[in-house]
Image: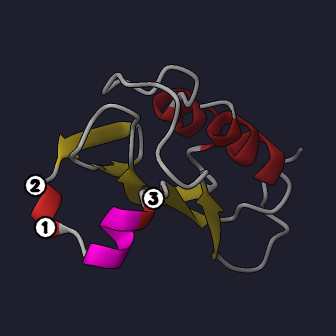
Amino acid sequence: MGDGSSEPRARALWIRGPRGGMRSGRAELPRLDLEGVFAQYGKRLYRCKGMLFFDGVREPTAVQCVGAHVECERMAADAVEAQVAAERRSRLIFIGRTRGIEQVLEGGFAAL
């Protein structure tokens, strides 16, 4: 997979989950190990941010990652645009040199 150093510039990789929320009703991210991803690919990933929706949980969860620091925070349900709240589709964006590690990032997200 290399270290991504041949990739000339940073780019964004958008990953979107299924509509209606992810299967896990827990606030933890059981299969999407963001800390592990940043520990392994931290030199290539500058940051990650997004919004996660879980089945059985009305409020969305905001996610931000910089380096190995991962922060998750529940948001007020009315703090999200009506269309986004109705769709309940989780989304993450990884910013950095993502070429060559897309499958790792997408695979962890799809497992949720």
Task: Tell me which label, 2 or 3, sits earlier in the chain.
Answer: 3
> Marks 3 and 1, how far apart in space?
23 Å
Q: Secondary structure at mark 1?
A: helix
> Marks 2 and 3, how far apart in space?
23 Å
Going by the image, does 58 lie left or right of 112?
left
State if disc 1 and disc 2 touch (CB < 8 Å).
Answer: yes
In the picture, the quarter occupied by the C terminus is top right
Q: Give the magenta-colored segment's residue range.
A: 82-86
In the picture, the quarter occupied by the N terminus is top right
Total marks drawn? 3
Task: Tell me which label, 3 or 1, sits earlier in the chain.
Answer: 3
For label 3, the residue is 47
For label 2, the residue is 76
Q: Residue, x 69% and y 40% (percent of image)?
A: 110
- Near-viewer residue (85 or 40): 85
- Near-viewer residue (101 or 40): 101
| Amino acid identity at mark 2 | Ala
For label 1, the residue is 79
| Amino acid identity at mark 1 | Ala
| Amino acid identity at mark 3 | Arg
Above or below for 83 versus 76:
below
Above or below for 41 versus 44:
above
| Secondary structure mainly formed by the magenta segment | helix
- Near-viewer residue (105 or 66): 105
Q: Position of residue 18 (x, y in %)?
A: 61, 51
